[in-house]
Amino acid sequence: MKKFSFLYLLLLAGLFTQAQLYVTLHEDCQFRGRTYMLEAGTYRLYQMKIGNDRLSSLQIPAGFRVTLYADDNFSGKSLTLSATLPCLDSSWDNQTSSLVVEDTRIQQINPNEYVVFYTDCYERGFSRSLRPGIYKGADLGELKNNISSFSVFGNLRVRAYTQSEEAMGYYGSFEKNETCLNRNFNDRISSLVIEYNPNPPAGGNGTFSDDRYVQLFADCRYEGNGLRLEPGRYTGENLGLFRNALRSLRIPSGYTVRIFSNDNFSGSSTVFTSDEECLAYPQRDKAGSLIVERRGGSAYPGGGFPPVTNVTIYTDAAYRGQSAVLLPGTYGSMAEAGGFPEKALSSLQIPPGYKVILYDQPGLRGRSITLTESRSSFSMGTWNDRAVSIAVYRQ
């Protein structure tokens, strides 16, 4: 009977955690006693709700991670957990004085949203652009313990870790540009996470005015977590926390959203062509996957080719031949620039607001030319097939 009860509790815990976006703490083993729910964040002794040395079991949803600390202020011995645990062992039962709750799921975001990191203050020095993801110490390369400033492009948030190269434990959170990090983080970031920011920048009702994107919201009346999507196909995995948790959406003129009840575009579906302040119960919290498209057969406003949104370099004139798309950053060799061949650049596309500097020597040395507009070709004897290194800046 005890074994049956234990298995039942495990099953119940599994069902419960799948539907939650927070971690649940329990004072007693087997998920009994008083309970407390915590969202992703850092919790010192006075913030944990459960009290000092009172934690015995906890429920952890898929994609979440919890780090327990024996002492306050994230110090002393630690234990990291990524799955529900019905009872902490004797070395940790009633031993937790602070903890960190992390949501490790990375949302699929507009590819033009990224963060540019610099080794010097005021956006100077070596730079590298990173898209949403988890970057451990080995992934940061030259940026490891060498970040002094960064610029955030899009609705993103940076979690910076100074005490771990594994993106674990205590972290600092940043939602805006940092022209010069304070001494607690300057040249001390060992790993980081770039994630979707659930708190969109202020602007009227908190939504974006850009009419190139469909906007999803976790709550009715365009509130709660939000996510922007360009035309494309989004499976349940792509939707992340919005999978089966969508309640309202904004749809720009000329766009269509088809919502499927199952993952991978199967099951029943419903088409929406205008804003939905609060989805009806048959569709509410039932989005297993969806397709965003523009009506009229074109995925882009006005039809035709997509607009230039990133710097793109080509080996041939007229934007032909081998190409590479470059995010803002400094590329000491053409091999670093997407494997582009050396002394082969013959044309390039530059979006408004970007600046490109070409160099005829490696390491951003030698003669240079600064460009702020696209060039379909270069005159022979000038910069055709001459670039050896390159720098891209977003002004």
Image: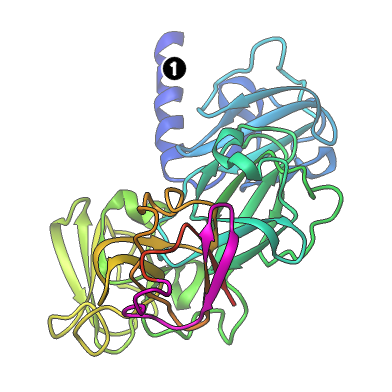
Residue furthest toward the front?
Answer: 381
Q: Amino acid at mark 1?
A: Ser
Classified by dominant secondary structure, the portion drawn in magenta counts as: loop
Residue that label 1 marks? 5
The 10 Å Cα crowd at callout 1, few under 14, some 14 to 19, many 20 or more, is few
Q: Position of residue 355 (x, y in %)?
A: 53, 76
Q: Position of residue 143 (x, y in %)?
A: 65, 45
- Up/down of 32 relative to 162, above or below: above
Q: Specify start and end residues of the magenta stretch as a single range.
A: 359-383
**Left or right for 378, reference 49:** left
Q: Position of residue 369 (x, y in %)?
A: 53, 74
Q: Judge whether residue 34 can be spotted in this image.
A: yes
Q: Nearer the viewer, residue 252 or 61?
A: 252
* Image quadrant assignment for residue 32: top right
Count of numbered tags: 1
Where disc 1 sits, the SS reads helix
**Left or right for 171, reference 333:** right
